[in-house]
Image (cartoon, rainbow, N blue to C red):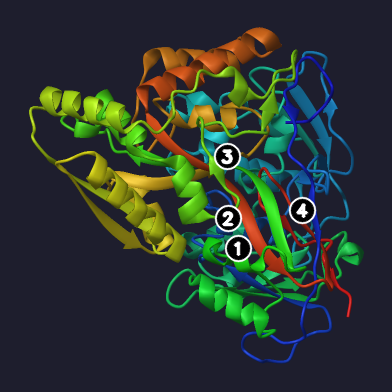
Amino acid sequence: MKIKLSSLMILLVSSIALTACSSTTSTIKKVGHPKQALNYIEKAVITTTDPSLAADEVSLNALNNVDEGIYRLDKDHLPQPAGAAEKATLSKDGKTYTIKLRKNATWSDGKPVKAQDYVYSWQRTVDPKLASTTAYFFKPVKNADAIAERKMDKSKLGIKAIGDYQLEITLNKPTPYFEYLLTLPTFFPQRSDIVKKFGDQYAAKSQNAVYNGPFVLSGYQATGSNDTWSYVKNSHYWDRHQVKLDKVNLSVVKEGATALNLFKQGQVDTTYLASEFVPQMKNDPSFLSIDRSSTSYLEFNQKESDSPYRNVNLRKAISYAINRKELVNNVLANGATEAVGLVPKKLVSNPKTHQDFTEETNSVIQHDANQAKSDWNKAKKELNISSLEMNILTDDMAMSKKMAEYLQATLSETLPGLKVSITSIPFSVLLDRVNKGDFQVAIAAWGADYADPTSFLELFTTKNFNNHSKYTNKKYDELVDQAMNSERNQPEERWNKLVKAENILMNDMGVVPLYYSVDTRLCQAKVKNIIYHPINTRYELKWASINE
């Protein structure tokens, strides 16, 4: 959402993360390189480069650097015209956006980016046949809900092209954060001829797509070995003179020790820093700690009527058994902080009092072994069981395994009869299993897409596609719906309903928040102007450069 000092807006208070760091002149593969080449380590592979389907952080980051929408976040994390030639004109009722597009914006094959490319892309994403997990972002757009419920054809979505270079977007109601949504890859344009040409192989490899952003994707394929890829400067990009890097070489390294060694050896210019190495590196000039508006939590599969995780006391017992201070200080040890709710600290403040959202909720999250045992005994009685086998699903990153092992130990010790096992799998496989509901308990995380509590709270409404747990509470749904609709123009009432919704979710322990994330990275001093955002996609390479 657009941030203004207005009573209608909730303020973003996260800090700027414009980093200056350096690079070396070699790549991991010791190949030749252009004079402006950045070697970057990612934690996981790209799962898809289809803008309609991308939902994970790595894929969204890739799309943000090779494609572009109507707006792009600037160094202050504010939406600025990108594909648009200027800021949108907004109708007096706050529901209609008129957007003039750049006439000099082109795709990587030289063809112009036209208004119809946006119309096609949006209609494709909301089409229930595609089953996009991010289609719910279009909820503010006129008729999006009816299309999702198959009550209306996708052609009725509230977006239309007026000639080749103008869009008219109609919303159901005024949406304060809508301009933030326009920066998300979900809202980027797509070429219908390219999608139709490649069919089910569209975006399955880098050659099967065209790009309209600062870079072009190269060397990516969805199947087989896909742990390396690159971004190459897009010679057709309208703002190419601002792009200093000729190439970005990306490699997936899952082991934190390996990533650190590659950095120390000069093989890479920037990498994540695993938490176990933070103590030894935190005073190094290359060390970065970057705030993130992100919460990690346990998600319980409550889909089946006989699922034990439908039992409130079981979920509460698990929550009370977890010592979050010990988790963040001794296990993670990377600057992460204890979660006190789903909505993270420093994301939003009360529009009237400016008090942080987390300070106004009645947090029930605490470590209390005795309460955990009491709730566990209640749950066993209600479920008519004496023991329970619980499997925790996590990705195969070293830190994820370590955290899962900590949870396994502390839950097994505190709750006698709870037998905890761990399944550790590649992130792309985990994402697929969670989306399909093939899990008992999963370690999950969500980062803010815009600076508003609904970026988190909407996730766990009954019909939300990303509500993998299938948690449901009628009153919770009502409060979130009212905050997103009828209460939009009543900021204090809206705020109070969101606080109440958070309290309901936490009293139910619909999910169990664990910690609020930070990114710890290493970056050489000669690399300048990589921008890290606390919300939305995580990093911008458009303005990055290497000063030898």
Q: CA distance from mark 2 to mark 4?
A: 43 Å
Mark 3 or mark 4, earlier in chain: 4
> Residue furthest toward the right?
241
Q: Please name the amino acid that badge 2 sits on.
A: Asn
Q: CA distance from mark 3 to mark 2?
A: 42 Å
Foreground of the two, 411 or 311: 411
Q: CA distance from mark 4 to mark 1?
A: 44 Å
Residue beneath disc 3: 123
Q: CA distance from mark 3 to mark 1?
A: 45 Å
Foreground of the two, 509 or 32: 509
User: In this rendering, which labeled residue sits more in front, label 3 or label 1?
Assistant: 1
Q: Please name the amino acid that badge 3 sits on.
A: Gln
Mark 1–mark 2 CB contact (< 8 Å): yes
Asked whether, in this view, residue 274 is left or right of residue 393, the answer is right
Q: Quadrant of residue 299?
A: top left
Q: SS at mark 1?
A: helix
Q: SS at mark 3?
A: helix
Residue beneath disc 4: 113
Q: Could you say which disc has been placed on residue 278 in the image?
A: 1
Q: CA distance from mark 1 to mark 2?
A: 6 Å
Residue beneath disc 2: 334
Mark 3 or mark 2, earlier in chain: 3
Mark 2 neighbour density, 10 Å: few (under 14) some (14–19) many (20 or more): many
Q: Is residue 456 visible?
A: yes
